[in-house]
Amino acid sequence: MRYTATGHGVSSAALHIADATRRNRRHLHKSSAFGIENVLLEELAEAWAECQEPNWDGYDALPVSRAALRNMYTFLEALPFGFPRPTIGADPQGHLSVEWYRSPRRVLSVSVTSDELLHYAALLGSSKTSGTETFFGEVPESILSLVRRVYS
């Protein structure tokens, strides 16, 4: 079993709780009521299948790695239950991405990399914001807040 710090604690008790929480979330995600929608998983599988080879876009795009696929799946699992469903795609840099789109001026895009980084950019009315967060298995509050702002 792999133990990693989630930013909330590194004691043996904290790691045990984090591990139990991950197992329980995985169990819930397997249910049809609470789980990651099959449509979303199919979209993820399609995006990865189409982007595994170099130059998949005809413009020298980098291939999407298994590590990026694994991190995207973990990212999707970590989204709060009942959150708006994003669309899934790939970036020419070899990352998988999710997008929450309400209108041309209310959109958030998050790229999930193979090295556990989340690069994001949002357009919220006349306001633009972008940045990078480290991904420790939980979606950072800064990104969750931006998703909420897209739909507010």
Image (cartoon, rainbow, N blue to C red):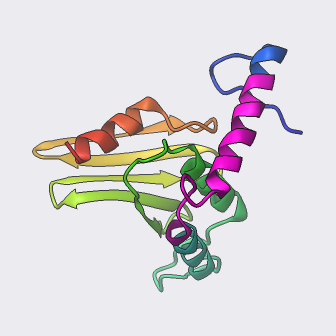
- Residue at image point 47% right, 54% down: 111
38, 143: nearer the viewer? 38
Compared across the picture, whether 86 is left or right of 23 comes to left
| 1 relative to 77, above or below | above
Residue 26 lies, in percent from the top left, at 69, 48
Compared across the picture, whether 29 is left or right of 108 comes to right
Which residue reaches farthest left?
Answer: 126
Which residue reaches farthest front?
Answer: 33
Magenta span contains residue 20: yes
Magenta span contains residue 128: no
33, 25: nearer the viewer? 33
Compared across the picture, whether 124 is left or right of 13 comes to left
Please state, as top left, top right, bottom left or bottom right, where the C terminus lies in the image: top left
| 68 relative to 18, above or below | below
Magenta residues span 16-40
Please state, as top left, top right, bottom left or bottom right, where the N terminus lies in the image: top right
| 75 relative to 47, above or below | above
Residue 12 lies, in percent from the top left, at 84, 16
Q: How many marks are shown on the rendered structure?
A: 0
- Residue at image point 39% right, 46% down: 120
Residue 47 lies, in percent from the top left, at 54, 74
| 91 relative to 61, above or below | above
Residue 148 lies, in percent from the top left, at 29, 40
Compared across the picture, whether 46 is left or right of 103 comes to right
52, 38: nearer the viewer? 38
Which residue reaches farthest bottom?
Answer: 58
| Magenta-colored segment: predominant secondary structure | helix
- Residue at image point 77% right, 32% down: 19
Which residue reaches farthest right?
Answer: 1
